[in-house]
Amino acid sequence: MISNQIEKNLSKSSLIRKMFEEGSRLKSIYGEDNVFDFSLGNPSLQPPDEILDSMVKHAVEKDAHKYMLNAGYVDVREKVAEHHNKSSNVVLSSNNIIMTVGAAGGLNVALKALLDPGDEVIVLSPYFVDYLFYIKNYDGVPIIVNTQKDTFQLDLDNIKSALTDQTKAIILNSPNNPTGVIYPEKALKELAAILKDRKNPVAVISDEPYNQLNYDLEVPNLLNIFDNVIIVNSFSKSLSLPGGRIGYLVISPNMESADLVAAACVFATRTLGFVNAPSLYQRAVADALDLPSNKEHYRKRRDALLKIVRGAGFECIEPDGAFYLFAKCPIADDVEFASAAAKHNILLVPGSGFGCPGYFRLAYCGDIQNILNSKDAFYELAKEYGL
């Protein structure tokens, strides 16, 4: 009855969700406090009071729940454009902004607008696995390119070698899920020079839901580095609104045929069935664009978990941003290792789920006491492997 393609993809579906479901099962047996769930990037923080107050205020306004332009409210898009104008060298208007149903919706809209069947999209490994499904939704071809070994920084030679006449786009994600790496400005400018030499333009799709969660490094503004760039952003992580499904696209005015790309994205928003981003959340986030994210909340958790994981003997780079640790497995089979960890009530995601076997990801966006309480479990797990 169902699509053959969907049936095939179900078997490859996200290891993240599978571990999250296993966490729910274990919690029902052992209790919340005795299960150490690092599977899902689901912020434990409540949204800021300003967001909640704004939603109450706008909920009772006249016409608050009606359709609007498919691109979103004009005044909201103007505010988003003004917000980005403060930190970029380009001049944006509402015409460069499209409100979307989260970053996932925004990515699908951008790919739908850009891709013809057979067009190639470069995806850097490790990657958020759904990128591959999003690309294939529009008959595109994902081209997996490895980042630098151990550091996970851009490997420009690998990217250059992967470029072909069929390359239509490259997806960047910095701060990165799952590694927490931030790509430095120097490397990004070198990549921009490589792409500028191409006969056929290559769109840079920058997936930036973690761009406010940086610790000791600045996140470069890609509007200042690339011409053919589409920024995809959401408020799921920065303002703890993952269930709100609210985000936006920024289409650089320097992009080739920028107005046509924007029109294509608006068309895709409507015809993919999103129609428009949630009206109430558009209003709420427009009131909160300059609110800082609570990065110190996550820094505290990063430092605590990093100390435990390294203390137990696992190798792990220090994340520059986001809220994930990406550590080396003590054995090659990371799925087997995840099963062993679950016996200690530790829920983690195998690196295979991100196209990078031999590693595992830990999301540290949960309760700080639960992180601290996981120490004994990690040490017992490490002992099994002689660490």
Image (cartoon, rainbow, N blue to C red):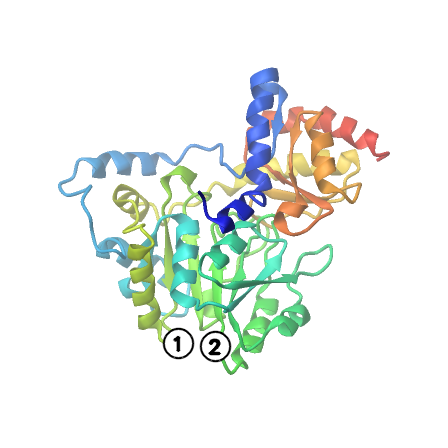
Name the amino acid type tagged 2: Pro
> Seen in the image, is 373 located left or right of residue 41?
right
**Residue at horizontal 58 percent and vertical 43 percent from the top:** 11
In this view, the residue in front, 154 or 13, is 13
Q: Work out how far the residue at label 2 is from the one at label 1, CA to CA, in angstroms.
A: 8 Å
Q: Earlier in the sequence, mark 2 or mark 1?
A: 2
- Residue 298 in the image, given as x and y percentages of width and height: 55, 39
- Residue 7 in the image, given as x and y percentages of width and height: 52, 45
Residue at the spot of label 1: 256
**Residue at horizontal 32 percent and vertical 66 percent from the top:** 264
Characterize the local packing of mark 1: few (<14), some (14-19) or many (20 or more) Cα atoms within 10 angstroms. Answer: some
Q: Are marks 2 and 1 in contact (CB under 8 Å)?
A: yes
> Seen in the image, is 363 located left or right of residue 75?
right
Q: Which residue sits furthest left?
A: 62
Q: Is residue 86 visible?
A: no
Q: Quadrant of residue 161?
A: bottom right
> Seen in the image, is 367 located left or right of residue 111?
right
Q: Which labelled disc corresponds to residue 201?
A: 2
- Residue 342 in the image, given as x and y percentages of width and height: 68, 28
Q: Which labelled disc corresponds to residue 304?
A: none
Name the amino acid type tagged 1: Glu
> Seen in the image, is 170 located left or right of residue 107?
right
- Residue 54 in the image, given as x and y percentages of width and height: 27, 38
Q: Secondary structure at mark 2?
A: loop
Q: Quadrant of residue 299?
A: top right
The quadrant in which the N terminus is found is top left
The quadrant in which the C terminus is found is top right
**Does residue 336 lie above or below 96 as drawn?**
above
**Residue at horizontal 51 percent and vertical 83 percent from the top:** 199
Characterize the local packing of mark 2: few (<14), some (14-19) or many (20 or more) Cα atoms within 10 angstroms. Answer: some
**Residue at horizontal 23 percent and vertical 53 percent from the top:** 73
Q: Which residue sits furthest front?
A: 1
